[in-house]
Amino acid sequence: MPQRIAVIPGDGIGVEVTWAARQVLDAVTRKHGVPFTYDEYDWSCQRYAAAGEMMPADAIERLRPYDAILLGAVGWPGVPDHVSLWGLLIPIRRAFRQYVNLRPIRVFEGVRSPLRDAGPEVDFVVIRENVEGEYSEIGGRLNRGFPDEFAVQESVFTRPGVTRIARFAFELAATRRSHVTSATKSNGIVHTLPFWDEVVAEVAGEFPGVRTQSEHIDALAAKVVLDPGRFDVIVASNLFGDILSDLAAAVAGSIGIAPSANLDPTRTHPSMFEPVHGSAPDIAGQGIANPVGAVWSAALMLEHLGHPAAAADVMAAVEATLAAPETRTRDLGGTADTAAVVSSLVAHLG
Amino acid sequence: MPQRIAVIPGDGIGVEVTWAARQVLDAVTRKHGVPFTYDEYDWSCQRYAAAGEMMPADAIERLRPYDAILLGAVGWPGVPDHVSLWGLLIPIRRAFRQYVNLRPIRVFEGVRSPLRDAGPEVDFVVIRENVEGEYSEIGGRLNRGFPDEFAVQESVFTRPGVTRIARFAFELAATRRSHVTSATKSNGIVHTLPFWDEVVAEVAGEFPGVRTQSEHIDALAAKVVLDPGRFDVIVASNLFGDILSDLAAAVAGSIGIAPSANLDPTRTHPSMFEPVHGSAPDIAGQGIANPVGAVWSAALMLEHLGHPAAAADVMAAVEATLAAPETRTRDLGGTADTAAVVSSLVAHLG
Ligand SMILES: CC(C)[C@H](C(=O)O)[C@@H](O)C(=O)O
Ligand SMILES: CC(C)[C@H](C(=O)O)[C@@H](O)C(=O)O
């Protein structure tokens, strides 16, 4: 039985990089014989402009039977974020309890980090909590429009929520270099983050073979720049994980490369795979977007769906393609367009 | 009438760098004839160990009559943050409505940024909101110790609070390169940060000569690494300003250099000046701490107290001292100790 993939290219370069990822997946199917069926959905800001909604009312029900979701990017100038993001991306993350946002960071050969001293030793994973924390919808405003107006928003950290993300991070670290860094700010944010620290410490106790360290987010952001090679797995709340993973992607040389997996590790619901970059209106439609973020995301999907050899093969093709100057896109200082990168990837996949 | 300074050296290298700043201030007084009187307070973790409190119950009342407060660093292993920080640093910031935390960032000649391409064009100021936002004490826990335990914490943004910090940032930008970047995350944190954006946009309307731009904190953190030369003034909430300023200090080559001013711009209460670095237990007592963060903080104090020529003179001494290899401390790749840096600074002020 082929595994079923829902494809949501979305907006802007989302469409271009999703096409690229599909070409690579087709090459994988030819080579490894892993069969997939794909259904493509046009849910996007363009659809919103035409139909008044990013996705249909039954979108979540339609996505539910799939084995995985491959997403390009959502968002477009003129469409407010509460429509584009809260009308598609975030509801999917939440409805399917994709409580892990996994974001690997590597400095590849041929990719120039903005840091003087960052090389192949930079290889870590940010494990971001993806359904609670600072991104809660609880809050509002009082005295709207008056001089004494104020807005409040509640961060919510639950014991099950923190426990499961911490366990995921420690389990992952146990398969890697056995080191977890936990992002906190318990010295300034005195209710939620001391609780985060406590629960992470309890989970750490279940993994005596994994070293662990807690760092305040301000110092941690600085260390990602000063010494990115020291990290193995970073576990962080929704907001801190968001900040650290974008920062780390910049340190690794380009946000165009960075992938992400929104995982439901219980496998009750489909997981979703998307590049970290957005729809990039400034370069959309020119065929020059870097497809590596989307392709690496597809490799994470292959792994999740039980095809580790195929995933490793895709990553070898990515490595070879980035190492060759003629198949690097502009964001990496090259001149290749998206199609040239795809040709190289497909050629390496034989 | 001499201006009155309360000096709180605090813990660890706080004591060493405050001594250094005092030497420099004495040299300023000799040269420029600006007279100060100093009272030193031993409020610290050491005092806590002996007396059970970081500072006496009437500390705020005792500090109130001063023209400024010069702080070294607080915090020591074994003393929990809620004691050391919430027993000294944060109450002072709040009691004296030091609602601006001003943190300038520069890449000095002779200081090596971890970034390949960061030079003297990097010169910006982070204006951090310092008394509300994410660091609110509102929140708590339910079901403590049970599987359904959770913690909540409320971020609070008020119209007066956001208006005054934004005005401060725009006024400052008008005296510099007329550009303000506002840190937000209104796409994910949907109550407080859209409100922040609205109020900042209103204030921007009062300053037609200042260009303004809003960036999500994840992308902004990445840009601080990818293109730090683009910024002039960054205005940010309490948490975002904390993260960005530490990150920026790392980009500028050393947290040992970074200064901060906790300002009450209404001048109703004393303002407080402190280096960004902490008490650094690992190198405390060795006489090797970099005193530049504290000295630069003292220069910010001179400016605040109405002595701009003296402040400029201190900064010229700092520049000359950092430019000379033999007067750079270890964090900057040199071998100088604190005293050698002080001698150089005092000689330049000679
Ligand atoms: C120690 C901590 C509470 C403090 C803060 O976050 O305000 C520090 O990081 C700072 O930036 O002054
Ligand atoms: C667009 C935004 C809401 C989203 C997030 O912060 O979760 C994005 O930055 C991401 O990291 O996937």
Image (cartoon, coloured by chain):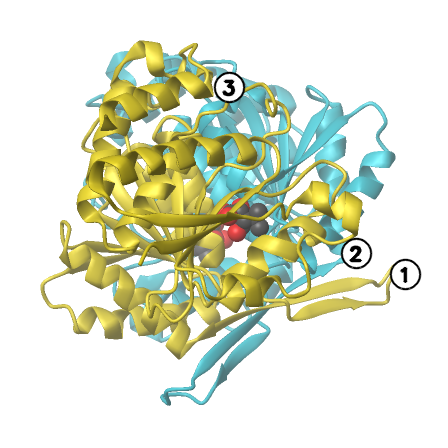
Chain colours: A cyan, B yellow
Secondary structure at badge 1 equals loop
- Label 2 – label 3 distance at C-alpha: 43 Å
| Residue at image point 15% right, 68% down | B207
Quickly name the residue at label 3. B288
- Is A261 situated left or right of A338 in this image? right
Secondary structure of the residue carrying tag 3 is loop
Q: Name the residue under label 2.
A: A159
What residue type is disc 1 on? Phe
Name the residue at 37% across, 16% down. B328
Q: Can residue A18 be seen in this view?
A: no
Upstream in the sequence, badge 1 or badge 3? 1
Amino acid of disc 2: Arg
Of residues B120 and B258, the one nearer the viewer is B258
Q: Residue at label 1?
A: B146
**Disc 2 residue crowd, few under 14, some 14–19, many 20+, Cα 10 Å:** many
Helix, strand or loop at label 2? It is helix
Q: In the rendering, at what x and y percent does residue B335 appear?
A: 43, 10
